[in-house]
């Protein structure tokens, strides 16, 4: 009885089937092709799709010897003599571009080689989209006169493009040549980065000069308000197009890239490979924040003399350098990925060894996916979607992923803001603290999740239980947000200038000590007085002089009439910046936030692995595409909106832009912690419920099918280490 020709079909073999592993015959000429009909792998091992040949050794003999028994230098000789490796369908399995497939590239034609280049691509994607974009968005607003909602549209263009392209890419790319889809996607992403940097070279030079000092007590101060839109704001469409290309290019990476790794490695090693791949994607944003911050300390017009410093609100850094470098690197990385074959040499071994764990639908419609021709045309698209919708395990895993994505998106956007408010940090200090939390907790959790699945050889039901356990632990850690740090006292906002408490929402920034200064509400530049009380600006603190000597690297203001002299004898003064918080709860909050991030990311790779295993082999790419659509639509896109609207409810002091309300300057820490607790509990409880339901309703294949499939694999195929069955 012949084996099925299609290697991606769910393989359930009966005991009468035979897997033939013939030894390679001696070469008679340099141009001979191995395995044109029998599908030999890179080691020369034949994966026969026909019945056993009388001249072939038994499977046990094949397993008794190493998979690649070559003498030193034999591999080089084979490539020099033009040996080709082809699949059972006759497709060449060499690494190269068309006819150009030099022997020096073939050592990279392995799963580890693919993993390296895909990790580079995911690293660059994370650095560009989640690192550089978030770092430079303020500089772009300042340089091109953009409003906050316009920059929000720029950021959202990435998710919009991904949602538009996911169905098409995952459906057709899943049955096509995955490395080509991946390579072209990375190339498009690189072109999007170059396009994003283009406005710097097509606009006039940026002119900025030191503004008159309106932040000290001078009297009769005024600020010109210009509501006219600048022509530079039209460049937002170029940025949106660049982000759209970023989204299009990254779409194949996390759908086809994951399934390509899963198809070409042993089932037990798949979570480890995918975990390493996603860890690189997590490290990318950290590198983007670090490198982007360095570039922002360079003036945007490189080589030009300027009389302002980076701390000045008119400063615009060299935001465009990172996009040029990352775009060029993405284009270079795309070419090696384009050279990989549709499947790696030897991958058919792993496909026939694979034991199906797909959820068994009651009406038996899951058997439709066994048809080799199913899903290759557009007319099968509705049927493929319906097949996934009938899989309740897949649906609830998608919903659980959406709840986790909501928390990840919300915390990644507003996590630094939470730390900034609770611990009275500057924006850069808060970003650094958050980076210290995310890199080890997020990256370590992602790697650890894949390792645990591989270490304990978990099957689909066990993987879902691991996800449930991680979600429960992170749910318990969320209760830490009952604790908060008290607000630093701020004159006119949290208390009066005389020291009495102010009810929430009752601002009074004017007092007798600064009544003659004519301070502007539009000029927010917080200072910390020598009495450890914060003031809205040096002007609101009644400071009349600026000291040329810096204290602790900060500008110092003298003769401040509003600063209480009774607490500290001597001349009153104020330092630029916020007062330092001495919150005793800081270590506890940071520790439990680390635990929340760790267990949230710890469940990400197991949940992804469970998704791949609960659907049919031929639907894995399409299932990931549908899952990404659900996760982005229900989690990634609304997550920041939900968290942002809840955090805004705790705002004490809003920005005043010529009579219009802008962003929030000061938050009430107790309210911020309370709303964060509510959001965390709601989404963690929902995630726990969805994982419980997915675990209860999952229906694995019958034991007889699993046993027969395992026996067939053990009797016919060697382990990666060459062990006997």
Image (tube, rainbow, N blue to C red):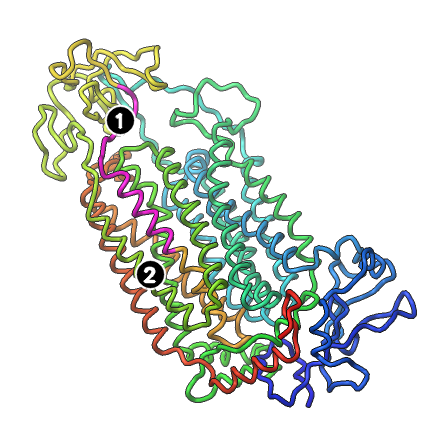
Residue 596 within the segment the image draws in magenta:
yes
The image quadrant of residue 36 is: bottom right
Q: Which residues are magenta?
A: 575-600
* x, y percent for residue 460: 45, 72
The image quadrant of residue 694 is: bottom left
- Residue named by callout 1: 526
Residue 523 seen anywhere in this rendered image of the structure: no
* x, y percent for residue 416: 34, 41
- Residue named by callout 2: 471
- Side of 76 where 519 appears, left or right: left
Q: Residue at x 18, y 37 (%)?
A: 486
Q: Residue at x 29, y 47 (%)?
A: 592
Of the residues under marks 1 and 2, which one precedes in the sequence? 2
Secondary structure beneath dot 2 equals helix
- Side of 639 where 243 appears, left or right: right
Secondary structure beneath dot 1 equals loop
C-alpha span from label 1 to label 2: 40 Å
User: Where, quadrant-wise, is the N terminus in this rendering?
Assistant: bottom right
Residue 53 vs 494, above or below: the answer is: below
């Amino acid at each position: 009885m012949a084996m099925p020709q299609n290697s991606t079909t769910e393989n359930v073999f009966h005991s009468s089937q035979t897997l033939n592993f013939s030894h390679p015959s001696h070469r008679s000429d340099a141009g001979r092709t191995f395995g044109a009909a029998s599908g030999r792998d890179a080691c020369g091992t034949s994966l026969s799709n026909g019945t056993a040949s009388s001249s072939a050794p038994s499977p046990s003999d094949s397993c008794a010897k190493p998979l690649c028994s070559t003498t030193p230098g034999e591999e080089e000789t084979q490539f020099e003599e033009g040996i080709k490796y082809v699949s059972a369908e006759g497709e060449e399995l060499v690494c190269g571009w068309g006819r150009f497939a030099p022997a020096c590239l073939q050592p990279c034609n392995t799963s580890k080689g693919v993993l390296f280049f895909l990790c580079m691509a995911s690293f660059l994607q994370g650095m560009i989209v989640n690192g550089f974009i978030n770092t430079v968005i303020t500089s772009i607003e300042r340089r091109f006169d953009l409003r906050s909602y316009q920059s929000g549209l720029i950021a959202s263009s990435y998710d919009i493009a991904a949602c538009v392209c996911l169905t098409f890419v995952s459906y057709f790319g899943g049955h096509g040549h995955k490395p080509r889809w991946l390579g072209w996607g990375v190339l498009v992403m690189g072109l999007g980065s170059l396009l994003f940097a283009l406005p710097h070279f097509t606009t006039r030079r940026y002119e900025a000069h030191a503004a008159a000092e309106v932040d000290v007590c001078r009297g009769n101060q005024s600020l010109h308000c210009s509501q006219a839109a600048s022509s530079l704001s039209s460049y937002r469409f170029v940025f949106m197009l660049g982000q759209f290309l970023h989204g299009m290019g990254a779409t194949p990476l996390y759908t086809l890239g994951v399934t390509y790794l899963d198809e070409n490695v042993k089932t037990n090693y798949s979570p480890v490979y995918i975990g390493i791949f996603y860890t690189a994607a997590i490290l990318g944003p950290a590198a983007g924040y670090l490198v982007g911050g360095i570039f922002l300390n360079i003036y945007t017009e490189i080589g030009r003399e300027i009389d302002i410093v980076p701390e000045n609100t008119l400063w615009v850094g060299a935001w465009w350098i990172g996009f040029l470098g990352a775009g060029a690197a993405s284009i270079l990385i795309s070419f090696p990925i384009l050279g990989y074959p549709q499947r790696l040499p030897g991958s058919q071994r792993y496909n026939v060894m694979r034991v199906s764990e797909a959820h068994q639908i009651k009406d038996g419609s899951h058997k439709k996916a066994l048809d080799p021709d199913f899903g290759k045309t557009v007319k099968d698209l509705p049927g493929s979607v319906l097949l996934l919708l009938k899989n309740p395990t897949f649906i609830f895993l998608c919903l659980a992923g959406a709840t986790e994505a909501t928390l990840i998106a919300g915390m990644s956007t507003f996590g630094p803001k939470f730390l900034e408010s609770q611990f009275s940090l500057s924006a850069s200090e808060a970003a650094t603290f958050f980076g210290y939390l995310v890199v080890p907790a997020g990256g370590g959790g992602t790697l650890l999740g894949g390792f645990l699945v591989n270490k304990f050889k978990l099957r689909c039901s066990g993987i879902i239980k691991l996800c449930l356990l991680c979600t429960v632990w992170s749910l318990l850690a969320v209760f830490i947000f009952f604790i908060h740090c008290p607000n630093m006292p701020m004159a006119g906002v949290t208390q009066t200038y005389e020291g009495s408490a102010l009810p929430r929402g009752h601002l009074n920034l004017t007092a007798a000590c600064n009544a003659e200064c004519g301070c502007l509400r539009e000029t927010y530049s917080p200072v910390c007085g020598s009495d450890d009380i914060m003031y809205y600006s040096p002007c609101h603190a009644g400071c009349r002089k600026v000291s040329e000597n810096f204290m602790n690297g900060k500008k110092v203001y003298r003769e401040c009439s509003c600063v209480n002299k009774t607490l500290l004898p001597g001349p009153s003064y104020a330092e630029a910046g916020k007062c330092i918080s001495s919150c005793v709860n800081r270590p506890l909050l940071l520790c439990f936030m680390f635990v929340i991030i760790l267990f949230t990311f710890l469940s990400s790779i197991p949940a992804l692995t469970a998704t791949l295993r609960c659907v049919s082999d031929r639907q894995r790419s399409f299932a990931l595409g549908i899952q990404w659509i659900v996760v982005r639509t229900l989690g990634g896109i609304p997550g920041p909106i939900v968290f942002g609207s809840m955090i805004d409810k705790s705002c004490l002091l809003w920005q005043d832009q010529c009579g219009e309300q802008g962003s929030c300057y000061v938050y009430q820490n107790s309210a911020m912690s309370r709303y964060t607790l509510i959001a965390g509990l709601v989404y963690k409880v929902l995630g726990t419920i969805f994982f419980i339901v997915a675990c209860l309703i999952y229906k694995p294949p019958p034991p007889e099918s699993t046993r027969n499939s395992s026996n067939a694999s053990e009797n016919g195929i060697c382990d990666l280490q060459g062990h006997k069955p």
